[in-house]
Amino acid sequence: MAGGLIFLFLTAVAISFLGNDLRVAAYDLGEPYTPAEWEKHAEETLNDILNRVPVKQRAKNIILFIGDGMGLPTIAAARILKGQLKGKYEIPLAFEKFPYTALSKTHSADRQVADSASTATAYLGGVKTNFGMSGMAAPYPFGKCGNDSEYEKNKVDSILTLAHKAGKSTGIVSTCRLTHASPSACYAHTADRDWESDADMVGVKGGCSDIAKQLIDDNKYIQVMMGGGRYKFLPRDYMDPEKKEPITSGRLDKRNLPEEWEKEKKDKNLKYKYVWNKGQFDAIDPKETDYVLGLFEPSHMQFDLDRDTSAAGEPSLAEMVEKSIKILKKNKNGFFLFVEGGKIDSAHHDTLAKKALYEALGLDKAVEAALKLVDLKETLVIATADHSISFQTLGYGTRNNSILDADNYLPQVGVPLNYSSHTGEDVAIYSIGPWAHLFQGSMEQTNIHHFMAYAACLGNYDYAAKAENCKGVNAATSLLPNQVIFWVVLISLFNFFCHL
């Protein structure tokens, strides 16, 4: 018996030493190697760039993908992991194949390194605001609770709001709480991102509404809302339907917001579904459903590596995106969909590299799912991050070495922290579809909002003098000088009478 155990131990040790060599044999480079191959690769890339033709028609649909905390180091590592999972050195993420790229400056109005609420206000609302504020302009002080003229003056309309005003369907999908920093900027106006429910506002005076209440009371038009955060919407001591235990941190006003949401939709004879597990989610028929509220966890949704995929569990980000698009695309006027892979950031904060990278791959799958369902001649698709985070691929490991299990020495932490912090470097923007070519160079994060509005003729860009093809009018025609129009009309009349 002892001899057998020793043999197994020695075998395991031998395999551990040979592990890297075994991986080498399993890998297929799948990329150029010789000078001739690299030259061919360059020629193919050059031809692809030279043959690009910008799409300059009105964007009917917009899908904005946000990888929370998905800086360039995370993208590079996820690309490598994606390849290694398929026996290659690397495979580009779906959005890395988009034709146009830019860099986004992520600072907030008052800090060099921003949080997710202020950055979301930038790319969704088009203005820089203070750290920790969502849907409010910077002149409004952080932490001020008010419902007065100053509050109204500093409220910022998001691109989702503008899309709704233009008659489009709208949706929000996130792996975080629906009331969390990034998704809240789609619909809420708050001077403190942490005011997610009234239980978070004990002692706060001024009459302002919590974020969950704003979502249900003030944004009844949003057709798809899926993510986590159930306990921000349910009353304290209410029996959670999934956990089968009382909610100890629920709402203090005793309001059951999902129940109220259902009643409002029922009273209006609308087609709706409130779901909180995968079985209920899978049963949704997009053809027979126009409104969905999905709250799959009391707080954030599970990491993809931990996710329960059974009927009692929760859907993946890709599954939520696919279902959302099928519901929203029924609108002949188009749609706007916000998608957040929010748990990339959560994992990085806890220095859980493997979980962070698998969350990035989850976002990658969501992009792939979306691309199969839309026409890129009429749909602008953007993938970017709100900010980067403290994560790097360091050292000089060989390319065949697993990106996750290398036995490299980890130095002792010099300054212990509760969690890893955000960083202030620029993040990438990837774009494809109508007016995607606007996203080039280094730009302020606020431009994302304005360029989306321009592409879809929303808000202040809803007229031909500012954006091409708005209201069916081509700007190249609408901006012709009066003299040219005069001669065109005169020549047309001349030809008409000549043929009488």
Image: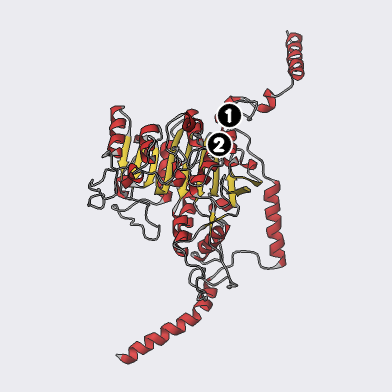
Side of 489 relative to 139 (left or right): right
Q: Amino acid at mark 1?
A: Asn
User: Which residue is disc 1 drawn over?
Assistant: 460
Q: Mark yes or no: residue 282 visible.
A: no
254 or 256: nearer the eye? 254
Q: Amino acid at mark 2?
A: Glu
For disc 2, the neighbor class at 10 Å (few under 14, some 14 to 19, many from 20) is many
Asked if residue 215 is positioned above or below residue 246 in the image, the reply reads above
Side of 49 relative to 18 (left or right): right
Side of 484 relative to 440 (left or right): right
Q: Quadrant of the N terminus?
A: bottom left
67 or 134: nearer the eye? 134
Instruction: Mark 2 vs mark 1: give the one in front.
Output: 1
User: Cβ–Cβ below 8 Å for labels 2 and 1?
Assistant: no
Q: Residue 473 location, x and y as percent?
A: 62, 25
Disc 2 versus disc 1: distance between alpha carbons? 20 Å
Q: Secondary structure at mark 2?
A: loop
Q: Residue 420 location, x and y as percent?
A: 48, 61
Q: Residue at x 45, y 61 (%)?
A: 419
216 or 301: nearer the eye? 216
Q: Mark yes or no: residue 56 visible.
A: yes
Q: Residue 240 location, x and y as percent?
A: 25, 48
Q: How is the image coloured?
A: secondary structure
Q: Residue at x 56, y 38 (%)?
A: 126
Q: Residue 352 location, x and y as percent?
A: 45, 64
Asked if residue 192 is positioned above or below residue 335 in the image, the reply reads below
Asked if residue 109 is positioned above or below residue 352 in the image, the reply reads above
Q: Quadrant of the C terminus?
A: top right
User: Which residue is disc 2 drawn over?
Assistant: 378
Q: Residue at x 54, y 48 (%)?
A: 383
Q: Secondary structure at mark 1?
A: helix
